[in-house]
């Protein structure tokens, strides 16, 4: 009765009256939700899949049915809450990331994937494609999507055109959706997508375990600690100190202590790139894709930068007939949804790159393929080049104009395009796992967003970090593509990690303009001499020949370690310098290498070779170099 009276009074008093009455009766009013409900209705349905399992689906439909509307769908393991009458926050915010779709009356659909939250069935982490998915009742994420689309186009006021998008794990779902090839599916956007959890995304980087991130995430997502995680039991001071005190994966495993079937346990059971991980490579879904695809990623995405680049490259190679687009900006994971994004940490990029992306790249893509309006995107590739802070538009990536150029390491901490001529020359350091190199200079209680653009001057001062720097650049140096690392090394034990960073050293007198200092949180940070990590990535040395079959080093024997860093798009301006750093830890982003050829998931710190000598050669018959994707002038 009380609710009915409120509704009647609202009609007489208007919105302001309702707000005042609700405040008086201690019932909160969500003004954004009330606005959204003036334009949209919500219904919750359980959509049946081909094997009888039903998936919870929230459908937000425009009240204006003067014409049929396109459908934009997101599938997620993270919950479609709120359930019941409440509206999803992205549907409520008409000025937010979904602004254009709400203004143009899209039908918005959110679905809990199989086995999660209100959906039935069994949840399988990054469920592999089923080899017989097109036969009978065999299921995977692509078949669940196909069945969902089939239901939606017959049970909504749609124009029979469906699009899908998602970020991170939801980006993996978008890739799997593309593989469904439903005739009504016209446009797909995997954004920062999980692609390969062993080679480059989230769980591992080049076979090395992402200690901080995975310990934070997986126990929270699954198993007996679901929804709570274990981080409160670990972090009492700061992540560097407390993860060092914790020890190894084995110590974290004892804390998690989960006997259920979880990905955490699978990491321990599958320490190398075996069939378990290979089956979960989302690139297996990138063959013969029919809908148009827009892959989106962040240049400073610490989680799935690898996934975005490699999903694009896989579709380009494996599905050449697909109408494929790529967009990369100067973002951390998902920052392209923050319409006011102009920079983060100590780095400023100019007017909002995310608003530009949403209004001039993403929405026009969906508009053309789902609404049948506007023009087909004129450029296949839109990539923001940091340093110069400008968008560059082209038809393919990497651009044909790049010239892979070796930059050689030299004695005396120098780097140049000239190959070394010395007959004997090397630099060396002691890699100490009691004092590993931290990922940031500051004590923090979590993995910060800013660490990918942090000032690296703290690392340059450490004796266990080799630093090589060029003379002051007289001309512009533009990089646009992947970076190849070729190190000639010798170590005193049987395994080691190698972390290489490509760094832009700012001029000593560099200062930001006023608009930057008014935007950045720490406007007084000394930017003169700033060392911006353009790209940094770690490689576990045992995988130098094969991720499937690791191999021990022969102590003190000269050995080549080569690997590829994710793509970059950066301009070194005149007056800046190029710096290369080499180190053997990045803690606790990556777990410590025991510096012995032993199982990193069952060993304890007592098994460690705590200190070993790492030698990096720079001589005529053993040159160490970083091959940069230099754009020809």
Image (cartoon, rainbow, N blue to C red):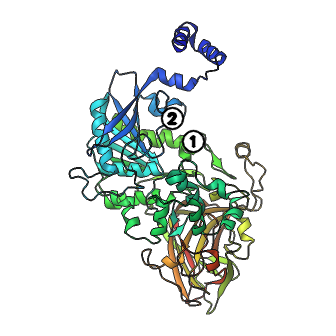
Is the C-beta separation of discs 1 and 2 under 8 Å?
Answer: no
- Say which mark, if any, is on residue 469: none
**Quadrant of the image occupied by residue 586:** bottom right
Q: Secondary structure at mark 2?
A: helix
Q: Is residue 196 left or right of residue 3?
A: left
How far is disc 1 from disc 2 in space, using C-alphas? 12 Å
- Say which mark, if any, is on residue 90: 2
Q: Secondary structure at mark 1?
A: loop
The residue indicated by pointer 1 is 338
- Identify the residue at horizontal 53%, vertical 34% (top origin): 89
Task: Pick out the residue farthest to the left.
Answer: 136
Q: Is residue 477 above or below residue 168?
A: below
Percent from the top left, x then y, of residue 393? 47, 51
Of the pair 384 and 127, the residue shown nearer to us: 127
Percent from the top left, x then y, of residue 571? 59, 60
Percent from the top left, x then y, of residue 304? 50, 57
Q: Is residue 544 above or below residue 2?
A: below
Q: Is residue 611 left or right of residue 220?
A: right
Residue 631 seen in this snapshot: no
Task: Count numbered badges in the picture.
Answer: 2
């Amino acid at each position: 009765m009380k609710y009915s009276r409120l509704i009647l009074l609202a009609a007489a008093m208007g919105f302001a009256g309702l707000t005042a009455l609700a405040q008086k009766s201690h019932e909160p009013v969500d003004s954004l939700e009330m606005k959204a409900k003036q334009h949209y209705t919500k219904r919750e349905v359980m959509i049946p899949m081909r094997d009888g399992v039903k998936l919870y689906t929230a459908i937000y439909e425009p009240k204006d049915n003067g014409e049929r509307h396109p459908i934009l769908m997101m599938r997620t393991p993270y919950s479609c809450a709120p359930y019941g009458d409440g509206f999803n926050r992205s549907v409520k915010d008409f000025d937010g990331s979904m602004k254009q779709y709400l203004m143009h009356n899209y039908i918005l659909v959110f679905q809990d994937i199989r086995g999660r939250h209100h959906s039935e069935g069994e949840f399988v982490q990054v469920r592999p494609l089923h080899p017989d998915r097109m036969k009978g009742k065999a299921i995977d994420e692509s078949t669940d999507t196909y069945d969902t689309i089939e239901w939606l186009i017959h049970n909504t006021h749609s124009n029979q055109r469906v699009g899908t998008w998602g970020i991170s794990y939801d980006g993996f779902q978008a890739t799997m959706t593309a593989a469904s090839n439903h005739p009504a599916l016209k446009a797909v956007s995997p954004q920062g997508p999980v692609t390969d959890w062993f080679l480059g995304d989230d769980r591992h980087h080049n076979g090395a375990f992402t200690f901080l991130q995975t310990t934070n995430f997986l126990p929270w997502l699954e198993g007996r600690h679901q929804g709570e995680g274990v981080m409160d039991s670990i972090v009492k001071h700061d992540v560097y100190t407390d993860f060092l005190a914790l020890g190894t994966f084995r110590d974290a495993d004892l804390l998690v202590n989960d006997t259920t079937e979880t990905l955490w346990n699978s990491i321990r059971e599958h320490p190398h790139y075996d069939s378990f991980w290979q089956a979960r490579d989302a690139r297996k879904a990138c063959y013969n894709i029919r809908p148009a695809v827009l892959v989106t990623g962040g240049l400073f995405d610490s989680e799935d930068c690898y996934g975005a680049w490699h999903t694009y490259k896989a579709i380009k190679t494996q599905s050449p007939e697909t109408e494929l687009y790529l967009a990369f900006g100067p973002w951390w994971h998902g920052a392209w949804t923050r319409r006011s994004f102009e920079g983060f940490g100590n780095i400023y990029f100019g007017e909002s790159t995310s608003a530009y992306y949403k209004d001039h790249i993403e929405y026009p893509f969906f508009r053309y393929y789902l609404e049948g309006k506007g023009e087909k995107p004129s450029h296949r590739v839109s990539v923001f080049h940091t340093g110069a802070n400008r968008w560059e538009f082209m038809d393919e990536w990497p651009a044909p104009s790049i010239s892979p150029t070796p930059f050689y390491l030299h004695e005396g901490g120098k780097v140049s395009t000239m190959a070394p001529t010395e007959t004997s020359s090397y630099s060396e350091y002691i890699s100490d796992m009691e004092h590993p190199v931290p990922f940031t200079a500051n004590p923090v209680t979590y993995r910060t967003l800013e660490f990918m653009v942090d000032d690296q001057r703290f690392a340059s001062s450490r004796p266990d970090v080799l630093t090589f720097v060029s003379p002051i650049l007289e001309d512009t140096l533009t990089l646009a593509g992947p970076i190849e690392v070729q190190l000639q090394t010798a170590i005193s034990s049987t395994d080691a990690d190698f972390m290489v960073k490509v760094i832009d050293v700012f001029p000593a007198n560099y200062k930001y303009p006023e608009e930057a200092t008014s935007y950045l949180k720490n406007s007084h940070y000394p930017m003169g001499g700033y060392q911006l990590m353009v790209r940094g990535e770690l490689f576990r040395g045992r995988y130098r020949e094969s991720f499937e079959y690791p191999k021990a080093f022969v102590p003190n024997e000269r050995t080549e370690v080569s690997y590829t860093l994710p793509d970059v798009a950066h301009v070194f301006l005149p007056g800046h310098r190029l710096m290369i750093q080499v180190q053997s830890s990045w803690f606790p982003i990556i777990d410590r290498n025991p510096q012995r050829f032993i199982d990193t998931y069952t060993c304890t710190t007592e098994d460690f070779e705590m200190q070993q000598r790492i030698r990096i050669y720079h001589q005529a018959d053993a040159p160490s170099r970083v091959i940069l994707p230099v754009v020809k002038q």
